[in-house]
């Protein structure tokens, strides 16, 4: 009897669930078909001081073969605030904007010259929005960025994110997420470095494969259509201080920033006009497995910053050959030491360039103030209330570089005839 | 319908690891950082130490007074009148905790679905499930923990892996820049979510009090709080000064696991797994409320209270706390201090009472009197 009652319970639960599902629509749920899935968002100045918000929405569709593909659509709206601009977009989509898949936030540099954090507040506050989205600054209109292509992705916002993922690993750009931007903004240095992008024209050759098989004249098989398309590329990284765009960094300054912030992962370095074995040379080095440590210290009231770099390197280019023949062990050691010294000088140069930029922008984008605060607490801050220029000028920055050549490749141009 | 087979110590171990950590990893680290800053991890260290010691005391109580719930224990230790008055405080404590935990669970589910669905769409099935589970009995509820135990452990492990890459020790520094005072001052405001081993004072009646019970319960509590401490530490170590902005707290770490290649939205998997935990946690607390209340007012047939009490606890929780902020203002106010006094103070008193009673009984036995335990 007990067994039967138990089985009845299952039927009752199933019946209740079925009944409940009949009323599903009564609860006015929003399924994925009725929301606008956003892949990227851009903010720029609109007309009459308004905020112009552009979104790139993913538009699922089926191709001729029936398989699902995705294309995208770019929509814009204006308003005095970001939320008003969102409402203007909703008037066009007629559906709720779904931010969870938004991969990038593109800020126009003109708009970013004012504090952008109030404009980004909605995204950071929202529980819909994933704060791993990357923040990017550009001189172009975000609308133009979203309408351009990336080399391999159909949805450009996702393509840009992929670009940044890869370049960040190679240290050619930075991946600053919304989380990082806010974390730095509320930190003692109140500044960040974010990625920059621009649009370039490229020639695209589309060979018409069908014409190859069907066309009667031979010329048509070789015919290819050439068209110009706009493609997105990564450009100089931008400095954001107190939420405002300050300017761009050159490649060397970016390297300096990455040495100071210990965020350098790998680098390819070309050193020109360097003397090795008494010969004027040009050397290409590939640095990898880089480990950087920064150690602040205060001695006799002077702030010191020691940057210790340990890296493995490979010599990938030599203008003038360095022969391995007849080189003694001591001679080879000397040669490697020379390369290490050259590397050390180069890193020091890049660090100094970054420091000069910090002074120029009056912005501690390398987070030095934050670093000292972390080690020495609020007591350090009260003693060091000087401007960034003063702080950098009065600071001793020392670089200790150890580069281990793991592959010299000096026998690559071995001459069998001597 | 009720299962007469008693719970095993191992099942309690599973239950503790499944239900305790998410409670202290959702919203709470966020609010702890608002109050204390990046030193909030110390608060979780303190809470963990207190709660593991607390669990030890609870096991001791359980061993001293078998086959009784907290009401029976209190009546035995302090007599009928004082014991009943004292017990009513524990019933209120269980009821309050049930309400709070339910609202937290609903906020969590609402948040994880990106607010696309209306809140009652989740609340109604959840209440229905909790009422249904009361009819099935505590054994069924606790045994679900065994089923989802490995999923939960997997979720904790993945969160740790996910956080390690972005963890930066500098985010936790400078340590105690404002001294230890803010941490100590904030501690009483988090008692609403601590002292969770209190449920064992009701569950022990339905548990086989074998020798292994101490080992399993202590191991369950120690591991649970180690997970809480580690993940909260990682959370603050990843988000640093902005930890106070991230409502979903530790769950947010799952975002860093998202990958283009395998799991585009890995966080969704963790979110679904944790829904089981929230359901179990609240079902157990509601069970404790029903059980202790029924014993307090001598209700033999629990058919009606099994429906009425879950409704009386969950529906007001939905209406009273209009939003997450309101919920936290109430949960972290005076109620939290009262919670601490009842759960820690009350339990210590009970332990002392039982200890005195045991010594008294021993003396009586030595004198040749019969003792009713």
Image (spheres, coloured by chain):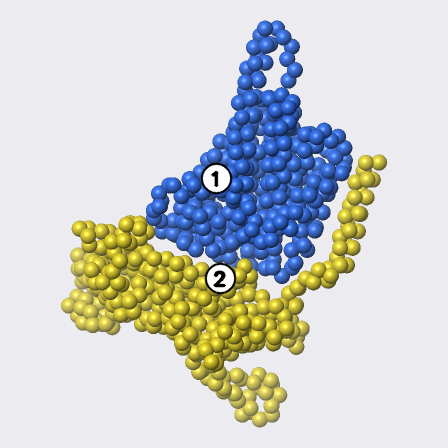
Where is B235 relative to A23, above or below?
Answer: above
Residue A220 drawn at (x, y percent) = 55, 91
Callout 1: SS: helix
| Position of residue A3 in the picture relative to residue B243 (left or right) | right
- The part of the image, by quadrant, that contains residue A343 is bottom left
* Closest to the observer, B10 or A303: A303
- Residue extending furthest left? A278
Please tell me the colour of chain A: yellow
**Could you tell me which quadrant the C terminus of chain A lies in?**
bottom left
Residue A47 drawn at (x, y percent) = 48, 81
Instruction: Kindly indicate whether the residue at mark 2 contacts the one at mark 1 (C-beta within 8 angstroms).
Output: no
Which residue is at 24% across, 51% downward?
A297
Q: Nearer the viewer, mark 1 or mark 2?
A: 1
Residue A124 tag number: 2
Alpha-carbon neighbours of circle 2 within 10 Å: few (<14), some, or many (≥20)?
some
Q: Is residue A340 visible?
A: no
* Closest to the observer, A329 or A200: A200
Where is B338 relative to B253, above or below?
Answer: above
Callout 2: SS: helix
- Residue extending furthest right? A1
Please give the letter of the chain rendered in blue. B
Which residue is at 52% across, 66% downward?
A102
| Position of residue A70 in the picture relative to residue B291 (left or right) | left
Residue A214 drawn at (x, y percent) = 62, 88
Q: Chain of mark 1?
A: B
**Is the residue at mark 1 from the same chain as the one at mark 2?**
no
How far apart marks 1 and 2 lie (CA) works out to: 30 Å
**Could you tell me which quadrant the N terminus of chain A lies in?**
top right
Which residue is at 62% across, 25% downward?
B83
Residue B188 tag number: 1
| Position of residue A25 in the picture relative to residue B85 (left or right) | right
């Amino acid at each position: 009897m007990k067994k039967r009652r138990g089985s009845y319970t299952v039927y009752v639960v199933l019946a209740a669930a079925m009944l409940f599902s009949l009323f599903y629509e009564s609860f006015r749920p929003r399924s994925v078909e009725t929301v606008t899935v956003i892949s990227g968002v851009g903010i720029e100045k609109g007309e009459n001081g308004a905020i112009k918000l552009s979104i790139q929405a993913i538009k699922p569709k089926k191709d001729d073969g029936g398989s699902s593909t995705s294309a995208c659509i770019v929509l814009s709206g204006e308003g005095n605030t970001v939320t008003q601009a969102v409402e203007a977009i909703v008037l066009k989509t007629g559906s709720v904007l779904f931010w969870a898949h938004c991969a990038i936030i593109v800020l126009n540099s003109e708009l970013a010259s004012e504090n952008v954090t109030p404009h980004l507040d909605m995204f950071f506050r929202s529980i819909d929005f994933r704060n791993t989205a990357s923040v990017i600054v550009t001189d172009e209109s975000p609308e133009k960025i979203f309408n351009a292509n990336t080399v391999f992705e159909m949805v450009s916002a996702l393509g840009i994110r992929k670009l940044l993922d890869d370049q960040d690993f190679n240290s050619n750009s930075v991946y600053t997420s919304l989380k990082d931007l806010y974390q730095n903004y509320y930190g003692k240095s109140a500044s960040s470095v974010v990625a920059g992008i621009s649009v370039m024209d490229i020639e695209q050759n589309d060979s018409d494969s069908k014409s190859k098989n069907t066309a009667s004249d031979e010329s048509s098989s070789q015919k290819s259509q050439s068209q110009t398309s706009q493609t997105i590329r990564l450009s100089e990284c931008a400095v954001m201080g107190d939420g405002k765009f300050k300017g761009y960094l050159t490649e060397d300054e970016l390297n300096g920033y990455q040495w100071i912030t210990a965020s350098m992962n790998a680098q390819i370095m070309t050193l020109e006009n360097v003397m090795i074995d008494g010969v004027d040379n040009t050397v290409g080095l590939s640095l990898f497995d880089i480990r950087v440590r920064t150690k602040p210290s205060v001695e006799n009231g002077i702030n010191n910053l020691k940057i210790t770099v340990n890296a493995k390197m490979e010599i990938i280019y030599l203008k003038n050959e360095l022969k391995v023949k007849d080189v003694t062990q001591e001679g080879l050691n000397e040669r490697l030491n020379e390369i290490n010294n050259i590397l050390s000088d180069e890193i020091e140069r890049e660090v100094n360039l970054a420091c000069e930029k910090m002074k120029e922008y009056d912005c501690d984008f390398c987070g030095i103030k934050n670093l000292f605060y972390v080690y020495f607490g609020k007591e350090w801050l009260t003693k060091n209330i000087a401007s960034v220029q003063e702080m950098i000028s009065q600071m001793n920055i020392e670089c200790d570089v150890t580069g281990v050549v793991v592959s010299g490749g000096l026998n690559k141009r071995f001459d069998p005839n001597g | 319908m009720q299962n007469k087979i008693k719970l095993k110590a191992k099942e309690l171990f599973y239950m503790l690891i499944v239900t305790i950590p998410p409670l202290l990893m959702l919203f709470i680290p966020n609010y702890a950082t608002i109050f204390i800053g990046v030193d909030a991890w110390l608060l979780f260290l303190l809470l963990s130490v207190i709660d593991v010691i607390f669990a030890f005391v609870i096991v001791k109580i359980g061993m001293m007074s078998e086959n009784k719930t907290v009401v029976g224990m209190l009546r035995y230790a302090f007599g009928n009148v004082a014991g009943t008055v004292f017990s009513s405080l524990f019933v209120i404590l269980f009821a309050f905790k049930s309400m709070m935990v339910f609202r937290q669970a609903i906020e969590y589910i609402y948040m994880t679905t990106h607010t696309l669905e209306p809140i009652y769409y989740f609340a109604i099935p959840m209440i229905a499930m909790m009422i249904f589970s009361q009819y099935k009995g505590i054994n069924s509820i606790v045994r679900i923990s065994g089923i989802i135990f490995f999923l939960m452990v997997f979720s904790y492990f993945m969160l740790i892996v996910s956080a390690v890459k972005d963890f930066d020790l500098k985010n936790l520094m400078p340590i105690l820049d404002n001294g230890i005072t803010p941490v100590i001052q904030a501690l009483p405001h988090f008692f609403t979510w601590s002292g969770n081993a209190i449920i064992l004072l009701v569950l022990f009646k339905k548990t086989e009090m074998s020798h292994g019970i101490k080992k399993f319960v202590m191991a369950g509590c120690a591991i649970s709080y180690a997970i809480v401490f580690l993940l909260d530490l990682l959370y603050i170590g990843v988000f640093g000064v902005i930890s106070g902005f991230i409502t979903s707290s530790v769950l947010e770490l799952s975002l860093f696991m998202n990958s283009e290649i395998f799991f585009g939205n890995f966080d969704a998997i963790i979110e679904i797994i944790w829904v089981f935990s929230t359901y179990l946690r609240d079902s157990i607390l509601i069970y404790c409320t029903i059980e202790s209340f029924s014993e307090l007012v001598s209700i033999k047939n629990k058919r009606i209270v099994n429906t009425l009490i879950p409704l009386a606890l969950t529906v007001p929780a939905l209406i009273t706390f209009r939003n997450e902020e309101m919920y936290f203002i109430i949960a972290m106010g005076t109620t939290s201090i009262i919670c601490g006094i009842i759960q820690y103070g009350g339990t210590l008193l009970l332990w002392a009472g039982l200890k005195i009673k045991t010594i008294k009984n021993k003396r009586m036995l030595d004198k040749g009197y019969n003792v009713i335990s």
